[in-house]
Amino acid sequence: MAETWLILGASSGLARAIAREVASRGHELLLAGRDLGDLERSAADLRHRFGVRAQALPFDALDTASHAGFVQDVAERAAGPLTVVVAFAVMTPQDLAEREPDTALAMISAGYAGAVSILLRLIPHFERTRAGRVVVIGSVAGDRGRRSNYVYGSVKAGLATFTEGLRARLFGAGVPVTLIKPGFLDTAMTWPMKAGPLMADPADAARSIVTAAEKGRQTAYVPFVWWGIMQVIRLIPGRIMQRLSF
Amino acid sequence: MTAWKRMEVTGWGRVPRVLAEIARPERDAELDRIVQAGTGPLLAMGASRSYGDAGQPVPGGRGLLTTRLDRVLAFDPEAGTITVEPGVTFADLHRHFLPRGWLAPAIPGTAFATIGGALANDVHGKNQAAAGSFGDHVRSVELLTADGQRRTVDRDSDPELLRATIGGLGLTGIVTRVTFALQRVPSNAVTLTERRIDGLDAFLAAFEAARDATYSVGWIDALASGRSLGRGILETAEHAATSVAPVPPRQRTVPVDLPSFAMSAASTRLFNAWWWRRIPAEGRTRSVTIPAFLHPLDGLRQWNRIYGRQGFRQFQCVVPFEGGEASLRRLLEEIGRHGQASFLAVLKAFGRQGTGHLSFCMPGWTLAIDLPERKGVTELLGALERIVLDAGGRIYLAKDSRLSAEGFARMYPELDRFRAVLGRVDPDGRWQSGLSRRLGIHAPLQEAIHG
């Protein structure tokens, strides 16, 4: 049966990899984001490589006034059950956020407020269709507030809590909600970092993400090794955490 | 905001090594911003599968990795043409288009190479005599030039710029779209015939006899000498009518750099002897998948580590058929005398001149060999350069790290026309590679500007 995946923020390195993974499984795609020209090229790529239907749609997380109309548009275009992947985020370096707090607010508006706005407006769609699923891309950065990245971390922590509640909200409709917590993925976001053994290939990560979503998992660390790493980091007592600069 | 990362960059042979600032843009808009910002010197980079310094930024220069610009933008099954971004690889095309009966027209020895790199080096495959090289099948390119403008270049709009860009080593700009023709194939397989060849004379005669074969390649035991000089295996192949089950790719990786004694004369002699004897004396014929036939080393990731941390050089030349036999003999004797442990050398016949000003291919015999980076290897390469010059041949820039500027100018007679195009599209020499500096490709331009 036909199935459609909507990817919000579809131009990022991770989102592109997820789209290819989804297409390789034969599903249709709606690629949404601000850079429509770029999304059109990605949609063409999916059509030519995998022979699936793929379209590009304009979507701006900050333009919340447009979200209701966007949801309606998506509902009309989607064939079969709809899976929504929230993949948009802005990561402003911590030092820039401290120097120019307005950049921190922009990060919150897009990554948190924008996600809440679109997901709340999707609830009626899922209640009506009682099918599909929701996938939210969080981050290991949301598990603790760390000196080096706490504004971004707090956006992802807020998103994690929201996602947990949304999972309960959609439980009755039979719509699973999966929170993905990626570690370091080899994309533009981490390019300036030194490549180490923890740096994961986005195509491999995408395979794990799509599998976790299809299994209806609640939370998935990607790659899985981050589950262990975050267990340890979570155990660090606050009085030690406050002295750490990582 | 573009992120630059300071990295060590090498070609596949890992000689030489340079430190450069590398960006890996994921979007067209970012690529445009970088070029328009006017910094430099710049060089587009692909899979870094050329061997020497052709794909290497100059020390302290800037490299633009195109590996994340890898989308298939258009495919026209009627015309058989495809338009791709530069980071698409031959492996991508095999995976998605071979099952539908489409194959790239000219395919290099590794499927990990990018289309951008294939264009910049005007690569060839085991079917060069029949099908020409990659550039022969290019219909148009979109080129982002030093002035920050994108222009569509084809045979009608600007034939000289197209000829400078095919095989142009990335020096005319960064290629952002390539449109080229795919070929229809009846299946995913070839019928491969392998047979032992006793020596060089027999090899050249066997090539002559196999002139009509779609694919032909010879593997020469470079350590055999005397009467066995030029001993090896000839492979010929034709597209098969029926497909074979694709073998699940068994990927192995060389985990670490091997110590230098791993590549001793004794161990390579053993390997080369085994390679020869594994083919039965009466020869054999079987069906194999096209990728398995074209890319025998791709199953072994990081095979360049076999040569150890110090790396290796690859040498590939072509010499005209006229007097070619004597030249090949001199080359093989020189390599043998040097006694460098080397794996197999590759021998092929080329049929056509490439279309680019700096295209490597020309009618003649081509010989390729790996040489571990040891004492004396640069002297050997110098001696080989002289033999190739005497023969009226040329050395493949995609493999090279040693050629002299004088030798280069003599081997590539259209260099002046190439320079004339650079003077038009990149007068300040913003696009530079380790190779372009070593060979003084911009030298006359710089003199004209600063002279």
Image: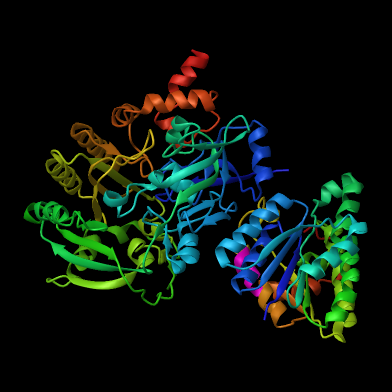
Residue B411's quadrant in the figure?
top left
Quick one: which residue is furthest to the top in this view?
A: B451
> Vertical placement of A5 versus B31: above or below?
below
Q: Nearer the viewer, residue A37 or B200?
A: A37
Vertical position of residue B65 compared to residue A32: above or below: above
Front position in the image: B352 or B401:
B352
Could you tell me which residue is drawn at 79 percent across and 54 percent down? A91
Residue A104: x %, y % from top left? 88, 52
Residue B342 part of the magenta segment:
no
Number of marks: 0
Tell me where residue B21 appears, x and y as whole percent: 60, 41
What residue is shown at x 30% (from left), y 50% (from top)?
B128
Q: Residue at x 23, y 32 (%)?
A: B389
Up-down relation of residue B283 to residue B71 (above or below): below
Q: Is residue A200 visible?
A: no
In front: A130, or A219? A130
Residue B153 in view: yes
In the picture provided, is B177 more to the left or to the right than B390?
A: right
Relative to the observer, which residue lies in front, A71 or B313? A71
Specify the segment rendered in magenta: A202-208
B389 in relation to B449, above or below? below
Question: Residue farthest to the right?
Answer: A65
Report the residue that reaches farthest toward the left. Answer: B227
Report x, y in % for residue A140.
76, 67
The question of residue A205 being in magenta is answered with yes
Where, quadrant-wise, is the N terminus of chain B in this rendering?
top right
The residue drawn where x is 43% and y is 62% is: B102
Residue B241 point in image, percent of width and height: 32, 71
Q: Is residue B260 left or right of residue B281?
A: right
Q: Report the side of B353 relative to B13 (left or right).
A: left
